[in-house]
Amino acid sequence: MSHIANSGRRTWQPIVDASQQARICEIVYRVCRNLHEKGAVDSILANGLGVALAFEQMDRCFPGEGWGKLASGWIVRAMHEALQDGTALNFGLLDGLAGIAWITHYVAGKDPKAKRILARLDQLLARYTEAQVNKWNPLDDVVPVYAYDLISGIAGISLYLLERKDERSVSTSLVRSYDFLTSVVSSIERRQSKNIYPRPIVEDPQASKADRESWNLGLAHGLPGVLVALAKALQIGFQIPQLAGKVSFLARWLISVAQSDDWGMIWSAYYPHLASFSLEPYRTAWCYGSPGVARALWLAGQALGDLEIKQSAIHAIDACCRRPRERWQVTTAMFCHGPSGIVEILLRFYYDTGIKRFADFANLLVGDICNEFSIDLVYGFPNGRLSEEKQTQELLASENSWQDSSAAFLLQGSAGIVLVLLAASQQVYPDWDSIFGLS
């Protein structure tokens, strides 16, 4: 445990040299100008969160150039689309209304007009949260991942509500959401004590009985996301009965279900492992695998002051760095299941521990990401939602530079990549990554 630095909060510093920094500036400016000029307008609601967040971070890194105003404009457009009649509205942190509320709070939370808008959004989220926690009982029901996960569910919404914990408009929904999340942990405790497999997780009419009786182990869609939400509440002193015990149990349970390969700790997508959801080799990314789980464990160990849990997190992220990249199962430069998400996690570990090898490895990955940039693509990077073959066909069929607007997405497109490149190359603290459950 001696190599875990106890250096406290340090100044955020770039990990790249001056020439790479200049190259990154050229890339992010080109991408962001195209995001503004070309529009990415198939769905403002779908694209707005990522584009607004990228523009806001550009404004913090390069103030006085008008990026902040553009960010606010995208938020307004996304909110208008979300609240108009007939919109099929999601409520999640990374796919819906909670995300719009989060970015509004992040960009303009102190503005009087923004406060009024946020109070209205809080009311809508409170009604949704109440409906969800009344619909599902983790102790008795089969609870689908979308009900509690970081992307769409209560874990993600809770992270937004915590940002607003001092507002009366969220007080009841905040307590109710955390009661729900602690019940998810209690259901594991109960079933483990009886030596039976869990019921809640996979909701698929075609799934086998074994598939239904497995826990999701991805940060994006599973129990590590629940751990992040609980750990953050503990870290800031939010009062929930038995919270520290729930965080400790879930962290140690995740460690106990880890597997091991030639390079160290690794997590499958589900526990028990599902033959019908094989990621051989297991994915190594933010969404699934060691990087995301390691970060969740670190935040739990940090909140608890538990060096043993933090050491397990270090072992897990070290194994990720040792594991050959051809075994990662990642695609394109994207954040979700690409190297950008891994870079941000490594930057966070470097910032928290001072262990230089994490910065060095992140630097290598940043170089790979920059090498994927192409001026022939409107938003600079391949679209993580389309196959390389499909993109090539579409590009060749077009006389102009072409790219599907989903290439601008936060999770699977250029907006998320821009944020990571800025974090690696600028001195501005990347508070934005708390929306991904990383801080």
Image (cartoon, rainbow, N blue to C red):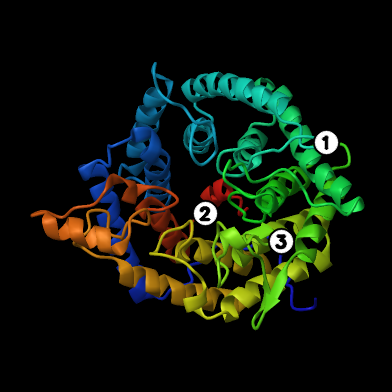
**Label 1: few (<14), some (14–19) or many (≥20) C-alpha neighbours in 10 Å:** few
Picture coordinates of residue 363 (x, y %)? 47, 74
- For mark 3, what is the residue? 298
Picture coordinates of residue 342 (x, y %)? 52, 65
Marks 2 and 3, how far apart in space? 18 Å
- For mark 2, what is the residue? 430
Q: Nearer the viewer, mark 2 or mark 3?
A: 3
**Label 2: few (<14), some (14–19) or many (≥20) C-alpha neighbours in 10 Å:** many
- Looking at the image, which residue is at 75% across and 60% down? 254
Q: Quadrant of residue 132?
A: top right
Picture coordinates of residue 112 (x, y %)? 50, 22
Quarter holding the N terminus? Answer: bottom right
Task: Please tell me which of labels 1 and 2 falls first in the chain.
Answer: 1
- Looking at the image, which residue is at 50% across and 72% down? 362
- For mark 1, what is the residue? 239
Residue 359's disc number: none
Mark 3: secondary structure? helix
- Looking at the image, which residue is at 39% across and 33% down? 45
- Looking at the image, which residue is at 22% across and 54% down? 378
Compared to residue 110, the image places residue 67 above or below, namely below
Compared to residue 303, the image places residue 258 above or below, namely below
Marks 1 and 3, how far apart in space? 21 Å
Q: Which residue extends farthest bottom?
A: 262
Residues at marks 1 and 3 touching, judged by CB atoms closer than 8 Å:
no
Q: Which residue extends farthest left?
A: 399
Residues at marks 2 and 3 touching, judged by CB atoms closer than 8 Å:
no
Name the side, left or right, on which 399 lies relative to 7. Answer: left
Q: Is residue 107 visible?
A: yes
Three-letter code, disc 1 = Gln
Q: Which residue extends farthest right?
A: 193
